[in-house]
Amino acid sequence: MRKSTGSLALAAAIFLVPSHTPAQEPVHWEVVDDIRAEGFDNSQVMESAGYLADVIGPRFTGSPNMRQAQEWAMARMTEFGLSGVEKEPWGDETVGWEIQRVSVHMTAPDYQMVIAYPLALTPGTGAPVVTNAVIATIQTPEDLDQYRGLLDGAVVLSTPPMSMGPRFVQDAFRHDEESLGVFETEGVDLLIRRHARGQLEQSTFRREGISAAEVEAFYKAEGVAVVLAASIGSDGTVYATGHATTRSDRTRAGVENALPTLAVATEHYNRIYRILERGLPVTMDVEVRVGFDESDPSGYNVIAEIPGTDLADEVVMIGAHLDSWHTGTGATDNASGVSVVLEAMRILEAIGVRPRRTIRVALWSQEEMGLVGSRGYIRHHFGEDGVYTPDHDTFSVYFNMDNGTGQFRGVHTQGNAQATPILKAWMAPFQDLKVETISQFSNRGTDHLAFNQVGLPGFQFVQDRIDYRARTHHFNMDVYDKLLPRDLMINSVVMASFAYHAAMREGTFPRPRPQE
Ligand SMILES: [Zn+2]
């Protein structure tokens, strides 16, 4: 009897859980099985990615392509059976701008077609410009004088040549035990630290004491026709984002007030530069045609949802940015993310889930200009600067995808330690797919950060980098061929499962500590 009582007391002690220890986070294995079956057997993720990248093409924010992509996304969401499909305005869009034709050639002392792309929000050249090329590399204010009176009507080479040679490193990487371990312990992305962009060490030209705007004003005053800059990258890969001066004035007037500026494939730029350094003349033929779309000054995010049941007022979100830079087709940045979140919603709808909370998907615009679309959405729905709406209280968690085509390997916790046991539990069904890492790294470059900045939990997954840094991210070779179908299927399945578990758990997701 006593012995028996003692055993009971011991048993009670073992199962007596201190009240501050969270209960084990439940995993709905039977729903995971359905998600996996639907996601791997009936996937439409590549169909979405292919249409976006190949048929629609690059989606510079506010451009006709971006508008077309938004209409396509709404049709796709409707086709998948989602509710509340809409284009939701978030504020003032940048001027609609698109490239209509680019043609760059060296015509003397030898003919060569030159690989080059206008920076975004560059004006056109009007007619083709056939003129001499001149080196006018301005690094400090003292450099201005030597070029006065020499640049009228010229195509200028505005940066030094870049070091270039055969590459002895691979472009594409998956994470290994070591790099995942360093995410867990030090919160450092070892692959980026080791390989940077995966290229040779390339010169990074920095101006001192003179701004890009001052240099452009000088070029304009001197009558420069076109500005060329060497691009990072190699083997015909060109990196092109925004024009330095129209970044801050994204109106049609701002664009038309700037100079046509192009990023040139390094090998081609270097050849022209070396010929000029020999004192020999170079003639170039450059034409840039751009179009403006001022049909609608508003910017939009595309939204859809699966309505919740008993906790329908509480919201779980997943999302990705739909806009892209303009030279590739925005395949890994970020048709991949868009296709994954659409596919996650399709899977959940197809298997007929009835989530407690509402699951909402957002396809953001103007991410590439500084998370502008997601910030606008958050301002309208959740408030800002510490003044928050009731929807801020009932919001649960946001999951983002925006780091290329690589499969998920874990989640970056963004400094939110309370998230760790929850995320670990939700990853448990995907250990066979090697989705296991809790990363102490704070991934900062994309839309989940807009949630963190208003004190809401938002996460970006650890992804295999593949050749994102070397070849695709903001490069002209960000194209469909760089997508890995199985990786995107894995991500769709994990995204669907995370959204479902967030919608079903006891209580909204723990809040992160406030961040700036
Ligand atoms: Zn992106």
Image: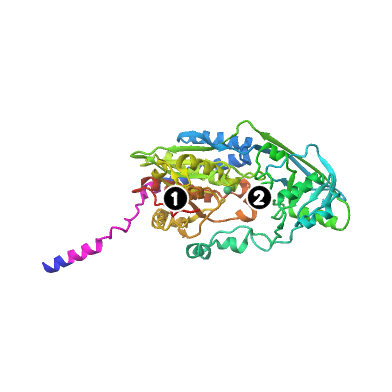
| Residue 392 drawn in magenta | no
| Residue 12 drawn in magenta | yes
Q: On the picture, is 92 further left or further right than 9?
A: right
Neighbor class of circle 2 (other Cα within 10 Å; few <14, some 14-19, many 20+) is many
Residue designated by label 1: 457
Name the kind of residue labelled 2 in the image: Phe
Where residue 277 appears, x then y in whole percent? 85, 58
Q: Mark 2 or mark 1, which has the lower sequence index?
A: 1
Which quadrant does the N terminus fall into? bottom left
Among all residues in the image, which is located at the extreme left? 1
Tell me if residue 263 can be seen: no
Where residue 132 appears, x then y in whole percent? 85, 47
Q: On the picture, is 291 further left or further right than 505?
A: right
Q: In the image, what residue occupies the spot 64% across and 53% down?
A: 471
Instruction: Say the numbered circle drawn on residue 80.
Output: none
Tell me if residue 419 can be seen: yes
Q: In the image, what residue occupies the spot 78% across and 48% down?
A: 218
Q: What element carries label 1?
A: loop
Neighbor class of circle 1 (other Cα within 10 Å; few <14, some 14-19, many 20+) is many
Residue range of the region highlighted in magenta in the rendering? 7-32
* 343, 196: nearer the viewer: 196
Among all residues in the image, which is located at the extreme bottom? 3
Q: Is mark 2 on a helix, strand or loop?
A: loop
Instruction: Say the numbered circle drawn on residue 475.
Output: 2
Image position of 203 with respect to 78: above or below: below
Tell us which disc is closer to us: 2 or 1.
Answer: 1
Image position of 448 with respect to 288: above or below: below
Image position of 420 with respect to 73: above or below: below
Where residue 193 appears, x then y in whole percent? 59, 63
Name the kind of residue labelled 1 in the image: Pro
Q: Does the residue labelled 2 lie within 8 Å of ligand 1?
A: no
